[in-house]
Amino acid sequence: MKKVTILSLIMMLLVALPAAYAKKMEKTSKNPFLEPYTNKYEIPPFDKITYDDYLPAIEAGIAEQRQEINAIVRNRAVPDFDNTILALDNSGQTLNKVCYVLFALTESDNTPEFEAIAAKAMPMVSAASDEISMNEALFQRVKQVYDRRAEFNLDVAQTRLLEHYYKDFVRGGALLSAADKDSLKLINQEISNLFLDFSSNVLKETNAIQIVVDSETELSGLPANTIAQAAEEAAKRGMEGKWVFTVHGAVRLPVLTYADNRDLRRKMYEAYTHLAMNDNEYNNFDIINRLIKLRTRKANLLGFDTFADYQIDNVMAKTVENAEKLLYQIWVPAVAKAKEEVADMQAYATSHGDNITIEPWDYYYYAEKVKKEKFNFSEDEVRPYFSLDNVVKGVFLMANKLYGITFTEMKKVPKYNPEVKVYDVKDADGKHLAVFMTDYLPRASKRQGAWMSEFKGEYNYEGVSERPIIFNVASLTAPTKDTPSLLTIDEVKTVFHEFGHALQGMLTTASFRGQAGTNVDRDFVELASQIDEHWAVAPEFLKEYAFHYKTGEPIPDNLIAKIDETGKFNQGFMTVELVGAALLDLEWHKVNYCKGDIDVMKFEQSVARRIGLPREIQFRYRSTYFNHIFGSDGYAAGYYTYLWAEVLEADAFEMFRQHGIFDPATAKLYRQNILEPGGSEDPMILFERFRGQAPTVDALLENRGLK
């Protein structure tokens, strides 16, 4: 998952610099955010930043940006690209510095102090963004450049940046009446506050849930490292001699997959799938209702029937109908495949004397049994070859073989948490490309999931070059006192996936900040991440990075063959989970909700019935913990983009299959057309320039075994 960038959140401001600003700056001159970062690559000085620095720096950054916007507006020269669009794109750098750090740490190393700061900061940042997007004088300058764009002899990237800002102003309310602008400002501020509340509730509920096991007999079937983690967790919580299981993915999935105790599986499944919908202070029903109504009002104010129409109008798909058409092309064969899988599991259970009907909490367990019987394969056989250290070396090796880049760990540099590792990334010619940070282990202060973002963006225009600082975050299987972090195949793919986003951030050569790295259409951004998952399990590459954590022996051929053979196993379930969540997302946002409250659970049930969701499968994310769509606007009415991008990446990877997965010419073409340009060109043009043709859904269906 790629994070929404600060640049897309904050568009810049008007209003004269307050008279008290100089005095304020004097008082806060030792604030690390308000001084240049003096280390080699301008890494944020986490060791020097205190809680007290954030809000004053945000206030100073907003004031500074107001001065920058004021200078644009008062410029008497005829508006042109440099004095208006480029100046706008480059404004707000101090504010960005603060927000990059604050919002990154709120998600990856959260504390009550950060929550309190973010609760105050979000309305300030939202109001600053609104002040810019509704600044009539600034919009008129942008509009003048836009209306006369044919006269300026702009190149493709300049034209796209101009069009981006013009559209952003229109979508941000620039054409609204004064009264409607005020209404939109209030809506945006309330929405930004609700995002924080929603995510906070999910995190707190996740950390609060514990499933306590008293007897060792109840642990039958569980991997040794999962049992060890549960014992360590119990000790941390003052329950020596017992086992405590949390609902974090690295614990939840082994329990659902391997626990012979059906009641333990049921407890785990129900605890997770009822996150933030219980009768307590973490319930998100009311927040969802308020968000849906506010989004509908916002879309209506801006001239759209629904929020889905508003969101999709600005990306590759263009319409809700196009997005749904793609989803149903995948949904129908996926449901058919899932029903076959359920039948196989039911047959297995019956033939082995288990007098049950397959329920959702049985799916992972019996799928694993069927896989073992069909392929004589258990994931426990391969986990020892996927230590976290080996997998990280694997993604670095992949990048080196494809693009010639290298990663050298830097130990004496600032870090926001001791678990973070920092790397100096250099190109084949030794030139510095980026700083890359990794943060892969779970902790209570980190929300679930995996993502990529940045502490500094890239810029490359008229002789000025700035290289980015990119980071990956995840909550993978934790090490125990006896074993290192040993990953599941799904976790291995997660590391490769997020690293794909990181590569797009690190290798970008876009000229402008607003187009650098992952600043691309939302339904294009997952191409660069999802395609890297193919290398994670490519038979010819596994021997180069998958080594047994004890013996150092490379993964044997028979296990490689089994990984390959089972690659399409259970894809009906996986695809139904994913497409179902995407359809649920669109259903939430494609209807005009204005009056009355929505019963969240009944709404979900009605969607499940309407689309034909198999009884044994749940949406990948239920509404109350669907952070992608209710924790931000980033993937709202846009979760479908994972499937849209998979169509692109599956088709793109066919090029590598045809010429060799490390073919230098194909890798060069891919780097030049997908990883480097960012948002500087139309994504379909870039794709077709790389692939030589328009994408089709065939490769996706083939990869998932759904044809």
Image (tube, rainbow, N blue to C red):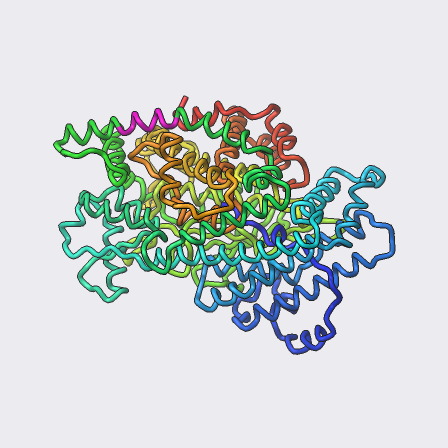
Q: Which of 593 and 288 is in front in this view?
A: 593
The magenta-colored residue range is 334-342
Where is residue 320 drawn, in percent x and y?
54, 33
Residue at 29% over, 53% down? 483
Where is residue 166 drawn, in percent x and y?
72, 45
Q: Which residue lies furthest to the front in this view?
A: 595
Q: In which quarter of the image is residue 336?
A: top left
Q: Is residue 376 left or right of residue 160?
A: left
Where is residue 236 drawn, in percent x and y?
28, 64
As displayed, is residue 700 above or below residue 19? above
Q: Residue furthest top?
A: 707
Q: Is residue 676 on the magenta stretch?
A: no
Query: Can residue 335 be seen?
Result: yes
Quick one: quadrant of the C terminus? top left
Q: Is residue 338 on the magenta stretch?
A: yes
What predominant SS class does the magenta segment belong to? Answer: helix
Q: Which of 301 and 237 is in front in this view?
A: 301
Residue at 27% over, 55% down? 229
Q: Quadrant of residue 328?
A: top left
Q: Which residue lies furthest to the right in this view?
A: 77
Q: Which of 684 and 327 is in front in this view?
A: 327
